[in-house]
Amino acid sequence: MNDAQAGNPTAAILIIGNEILSGRTQDVNVQFIAQRLAALGIRLQEVRVVPDIAARIIGAVNELRAAYTMLFTTGGIGPTHDDITSECIAAAFGVPWELHEETDQEMKAHMGERYNEARQRMATMPRGAVPIKNEASIAPGFTMGNVHVMAGVPRIMQSMMKTLEATLPRGEAIQMRAVHGMGVMEGGIAAGLEAIQEAFPQLDLGSYPFKRDGGWGVALVAKGTDLPAIEAAIIQATELIRAQGVEPVQGEPG
Amino acid sequence: MNDAQAGNPTAAILIIGNEILSGRTQDVNVQFIAQRLAALGIRLQEVRVVPDIAARIIGAVNELRAAYTMLFTTGGIGPTHDDITSECIAAAFGVPWELHEETDQEMKAHMGERYNEARQRMATMPRGAVPIKNEASIAPGFTMGNVHVMAGVPRIMQSMMKTLEATLPRGEAIQMRAVHGMGVMEGGIAAGLEAIQEAFPQLDLGSYPFKRDGGWGVALVAKGTDLPAIEAAIIQATELIRAQGVEPVQGEPG
């Protein structure tokens, strides 16, 4: 994260989820959203996971929506008693939490007799919210100011994200290239890698050890918006690996 | 998260990782640590992911170590230029960052001529830190006050966590039981589930939709330290599913 990307819009993700904090569920939403944001040129700057406790949700929403261009939340918008995200967004913005008439009509038409009090909670939103319609669920997410409120179920979140993307401000796409080598040790290339970072201050150079087939290797990753610089940095990183007596392989270790 | 667990120690996790925020890497450390903490009776209350930027790391460390009984960090303790966690912990505590003599000797003895300046960074710690030795790496993590600083590579982090566990304060183990049913809709059981939650205020009752073999189901999860109450709540949740005309299945959907 450096000055060369400083003009790009920024974002945070807030995961509302006891099930992540208890270890019950492996989160997969962060990586999906992160990859989509990178493609849109939006810099993801922070992720938080908080429990289903109103004060915690409201506090985090207000901190993060003030600190970044936009905030994405996942989780807590279903019909059950532990789904309190929507009320909390209303409280964070200091607006009433009220039935969204159009959504109410659509859900009633779709669900008929099954449209009960619990389900009507999913048509209730902060005043001023704009629904995020999606192909995966009749119940929408919603956008309130710069906060995009999405489901926690990955399939539904992904569908909401697809709808949202057309509406988001964009920056220069953040690109990434990698080269890796088996048997390379980070300690042996650290000085050389730092020199490459200094030669390309507009990029982020990262070094990531990995284990494969019982042996260790290192992946070197160049990231930024300046693709020619990324490619030049990867050529130097490739030479750095070769100088260790290792045959470099382009791309991620996979 | 409720009052019945209020006596248990609390924890947060801070992930220092551009590679998570860029979408390059799928985090798997949170779930591992979360499950170990639950077994030890430690309530994980927050997770944050921040980039490899000193001010962001120092700020998050100081907020989280003040707010919870203990803080675990992962990432940023290798030998390369983007590994700045250790210096940041020293800055957060306002103490010098200096060579840890015993670790320096051990790494020198182990690595011989390969022990260069970059690797010596891994023997450099905040003054007063206690190394976290481990089976996966000669370079240790360290504990500074209530902050446990671990590697980001899952295999090494897990080995450090194993060492740490003997030293952590414990609470009553947090237990979890589940029952699930295919074809159950959250909206159909929300009122019944809320009634069970009200009958067992010492527990957290959660409801989690899942998709399997092309159809949707719901898992109902009871969590807390009171095992007889958990089992009684799951019996009621089982009846709730059966009342929907669905055959309940004990446990997680797997």
Image (cartoon, coloured by chain):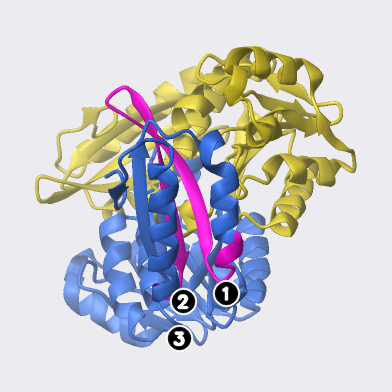
Chain colours: A yellow, B blue
Q: Which residues are magenta?
A: B198-227
Picture residue at 63% right of the left edge, 25% below the top: A115
Measured in 3D between alpha carbons, the distance from the residue under mark 2 to the one under mark 1, in whole angstroms, is 7 Å
- Using a 10 Å C-alpha cutoff, classify the residue at mark 2 as few (fewer than 14 neighbours), some (14 to 19) or many (20 or more): many
The image position of residue B25, as x and y in percent, is 39, 40
The question of residue A212 being in magenta is answered with: no
Residues under numbered marks 2 and 1 in contact, where contact means CB atoms less than 8 Å apart: yes
Which is more toward the observer, B124 or A176? A176
Return the disc, 3 or 2, that comes first in the chain's sequence.
2
Measured in 3D between alpha carbons, the distance from the residue under mark 3 to the one under mark 2, in whole angstroms, is 23 Å
Residues under numbered marks 3 and 2 in contact, where contact means CB atoms less than 8 Å apart: no
Disc 2 secondary structure class: strand
Which is more toward the observer, B70 or B179? B179
Residue A24 sits in quarter: bottom left
User: Which amino acid type is marked by label 2?
Assistant: Met
User: Which amino acid type is marked by label 3?
Assistant: Pro
- Using a 10 Å C-alpha cutoff, classify the residue at mark 3 as few (fewer than 14 neighbours), some (14 to 19) or many (20 or more): some
Residue B90 — which label? 1
The image position of residue B71, as x and y in percent, is 53, 71
Q: Quadrant of the C terminus of chain B?
A: top left
Image label count: 3
* Residue beneath disc 2: B125
Q: Of the residues tagged 3 and 2, which is closer to the observer?
A: 3
Picture residue at 52% right of the left edge, 41% below the top: B189
Vertical position of residue B232 compared to residue B183: above or below: below
Vertical position of residue B156 compared to residue B171: above or below: above
Vertical position of residue A15 compared to residue A53: above or below: above
